[in-house]
Amino acid sequence: MSFADKLRAWMPLHENGVSRAVHFVGAYMFLFALLVPLSRVHLPVAGLELTAAHTLVVAVVLYAITLEWTAGLLMALPLAPLLAAATSVGTLPGVTVAIVAVGVMVVRFALVIAAHVVFEKKTHGLSLGGPQLFFIEPVYLLTLALFAVGLKRGLYARVMAGGAPVAPLAT
């Protein structure tokens, strides 16, 4: 399934601006909650001090860029300070790290679910591509912003070529 097809299915379930903003922040909260404990896993690579958190950030950025390169690069910009913050929190005692990671994840899911229920009056579970969507949802949102300012016309045409965006059937 192409990115245009995925975006076409995603759009009708994320029409409200508040819900979109919550999803944007929620994706980075999801990443932060994972990066905090992963920053404690050190990986010696060619004399560099890397962590599993670095590996996750690189994987997310590469995947985001393969979906839509401009939005993927824009999505990657906040990941540097996010990784730095997660690494700082990761130096705290282990129990504190776990409490922060789980707490952020719980708040993230509560906010996103509430945004769907309250502002969208609908929800979709994982029907739009599975859990990897949690990592890269800003790519979808930033692509809509690029459409709004008149950029990415070719992609926009491909999204609309399949007909009006329609929600996928629940599975």
Image (spheres, rainbow, N blue to C red):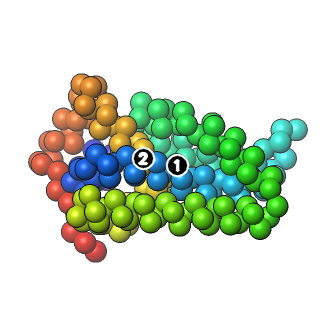
Report which residue position mark 1 lands on: 28
Q: Answer with left or right where residue 43 lies relative to residue 101.
A: right
- The image position of residue 68, as x and y in percent, is 39, 37
Please give the residue where the numbered disc 2 appears in the rendered image. 24
Q: Amino acid at mark 2?
A: Phe
| Outermost top residue | 150
* Observer-nearest of 9 and 121: 121
Q: Is residue 128 visible?
A: no
**Above/below status of 159 relative to 34:** above
Secondary structure at numbered mark 2 = helix
Which of the 4 image quadrants contains residue 145?
top left
Residue 15 on image: x %, y %: 23, 50
Q: Residues within 10 Å of mark 2 (few under 14, many from 20)?
A: many
Q: Is residue 32 visible?
A: yes
Q: Quadrant where the C terminus lies?
A: bottom left
Q: Residue furthest left?
A: 163
Task: Specify the label residue 41 is tagged with.
Answer: none
Q: Residue 25 at x, y = what percent?
A: 46, 48
Distance of mark 2 from mark 1, alpha carbons? Answer: 7 Å
Amino acid tagged 1: Tyr
In this view of the protein, which residue sits in the foreground, 9 or 1?
A: 9
User: Could you say which quadrant of the image residue 83 lies in?
Assistant: top right
Q: Quadrant of residue 129?
A: bottom left
Helix, strand or loop status at disc 1: helix
Q: Nearer the viewer, residue 29 or 138?
A: 29
The residue shown at (60%, 65%) is 103
Evaluate if marks 2 and 1 touch, with contact meaning CB atoms under 8 Å apart.
yes
Query: Residue at left 70%, top 66%?
Result: 98
